[in-house]
Image (spheres, rainbow, N blue to C red):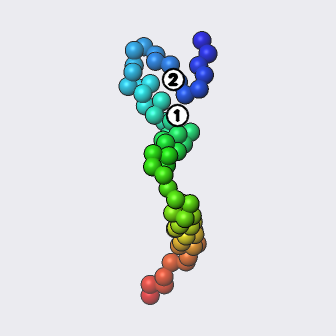
Amino acid sequence: MKLYGRSVLVKDGNVEKALRKFKKKIADSGLLIELRARETYEKPTTTRKRRKAAAKNRWRKQVASQKLPKKQF
């Protein structure tokens, strides 16, 4: 039996486990994020602003991880 697309096989009637696997597949594919983004229209300027803010946060996080700890003596 071949499964295509975003589907999971329920083994031994264990629906909870299959549901967890399905949710993980959907989350990994990025489908939920895309769906939420398409729910409402976002102006191009707002999109650019949001992406630029995310890039700044990533940069700050990277710089902070490379910083040496303060001297405590």
> Where is residue 11 shown, x and y percent of the image?
46, 16
> Where is residue 39 shown, x and y percent of the image?
45, 45
SS state under label 2: loop
Name the residue at 48% across, 84% down. 71
Sequence-first disc among 2 and 1 = 2
Name the residue at 56% across, 76% down. 67
- Dot 1: within a 10 Å radius of its alpha carbon, few (fewer than 14), some, or many (20 or more) residues? some
Name the residue at 52% across, 34% down. 25
Q: CA distance from mark 2 to mark 1?
A: 9 Å
Viewer-side residue, 72 vs 5: 5
User: Is residue 27 found left or right of 2 in the rendered image?
Assistant: left
> Where is residue 68 shown, x and y percent of the image?
55, 77
- Dot 2: within a 10 Å radius of its alpha carbon, few (fewer than 14), some, or many (20 or more) residues? some
> Where is residue 63 shown, x and y percent of the image?
57, 73
Q: Residue furthest bottom?
A: 73
Placement of the N terminus among the 4 image quadrants: top right
Q: Is residue 32 visible?
A: yes
Is the residue 4 above or below the residue 25 in the image? Answer: above
The kind of residue tagged 2 is: Val
Placement of the C terminus among the 4 image quadrants: bottom left
Is the residue 42 above or below the residue 55 in the image? Answer: above
Is the residue 1 above or below the residue 23 in the image? Answer: above
Q: Is residue 36 visible?
A: no
The kind of residue tagged 1 is: Lys
SS state under label 1: helix
> Pointer 2: what residue?
8
> Pointer 1: what residue?
25
Residue contact at pointers 2 and 1, CB within 8 angstroms: yes
Is the residue 62 above or below the residue 11 in the image? Answer: below
Viewer-side residue, 58 vs 46: 46
